[in-house]
Amino acid sequence: MINTREIMETIKMIDDQHLDIRTITMGISLLDCIDSDAKRCCEKIYDKITRYAKDLVRTGEDISRQYGIPIINKRISVTPIAMIAGATDAKDYVCFAETLNRAAIETGVNFIGGFSALVHKGFAKGDRILIESIPEALATTDRVCSSVGVATTKAGINMDAVKLMGETVVKTAQLTADRDSFGCAKLVVFANAVEDNPFMAGAFHGVGEGDAVINVGVSGPGVVKSALEKVKGAEFGVVADTIKKTAFKITRMGQLVAQEASRRLNIPFGIVDLSLAPTPEIGDSVAYILEEMGLEKCGTHGTTAALALLNDAVKKGGVMASSYVGGLSGAFIPVSEDAGMIAAAECGALTLDKLEAMTCVCSVGLDMIAVPGDTSASTISAIIADEAAIGMINQKTTAVRIIPVMGKGVGETVEFGGLLGYAPIMPVHGYSSEEFIARGGRIPAPIHSLKN
């Protein structure tokens, strides 16, 4: 049972330390919407999403009012559209993105994810069409998010897909240049993509999932920083234990909300994703947690070690609180969404190379990074390849959400607003990777993938 002291602690976390439920995400399978006629398929998709998710937003708001817990976003994820649309006669899949956007508007959710393809070992019929449709789809919709899986530990890295995704990122940036290339903020390229991720822009409903499911994403870096302030100067064992105990409390709250939403919506509970997802708010920063451990500025020597401790302790605390922790659980390091990361990048302490090293030990990867608008497609592909290699070799999910901001260069900033914050334009290496990317083919899976 939850006692009075725990209730008071939770109230303090919410009021003073920015604790919130980042998202309630309803995953919906579209496998039964497959139809050879694209128009009928879109109608089925719209009808199913709006039927299942009609009460999602209202339920989230009711739970938030009843328990006093902020629930920031209500979202939907669906089966990767390439799998559904591949059975149709459509020549491009922008109409499917428009259908998803209409459904998102009708249900009132913030975002809908799943305009996606999984091409880690090759391209099926619908995959190339979907990828080629991404720039226009993201330019003409407001709430649709897209992701593409290009690598896994078992399959290796599909370098043809990596090349194509570099080009796709640039085209998306160009088509949304009037909005500071915002379309790229809704596009993620994955290695080892997971089927139950509730966070955008990478959420999709995996084929191993049920017909519908409720997944919850919990945040709370401000709570962890506050806890560490009370053990200033203590040795690392104490630091790890403090983070674990805090993560336990955060996860308990997340599971409460997830189970309550599941009960009210009559949709099975899936997982709690315990991810320290920061915001641009001062005090709600993963970078500040690392600095609280003793680093003068995030990005200096020791940052990777501090982040490794944080990520591991968060997971250990979370799995003690719930038997169904999943998604990407750990610490996110999106530059534009984290006030401390922004400050570190602005003063030069945090570079793209250091961020890449940090992604070896934390959740996801190079996230919400703005680079000069004249960055070549091959350079972006090479950045994707490097991050995919980290994921493949380390058997972890990694991703790239990178934004070449058209018309801007190093020293300037880009404003995205809301949870997406703002970002300084970070430099990339000037030397070419074009011949490397042009080779194509597939980088083979590592030897340790042979586990059967």
Image (spheres, rainbow, N blue to C red):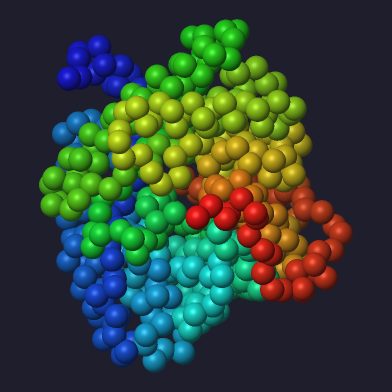
Q: Residue furthest right?
A: 431
In this view, the residue in front, 134 or 196, is 196
Q: Residue furthest front?
A: 452
In this view, the residue in front, 341 or 123, is 123
Q: Position of residue 192 (x, y in %)?
A: 52, 55
Labels in figure, total: 0
In this rendering, is residue 45 above or below 315? below
Q: Quadrant of the N terminus?
A: top left
In this rendering, is residue 449 above or below 41? above
Residue, x 23% and y 47% (percent of image)? 269
Q: Position of residue 261 (x, y in %)?
A: 19, 44
In this view, the residue in front, 276 or 445, is 445
Quadrant of residue 20 within the rendered picture: top left
Q: Left or right: where does residue 268 sit relative to residue 111?
A: left
Q: Position of residue 174 (x, y in %)?
A: 63, 71
Does residue 223 appear in the picture of this structure? Answer: no
Residue, x 24% and y 38% (percent of image)? 257
Q: Position of residue 336 (x, y in %)?
A: 58, 45
Residue, x 28% and y 48% (percent of image)? 270
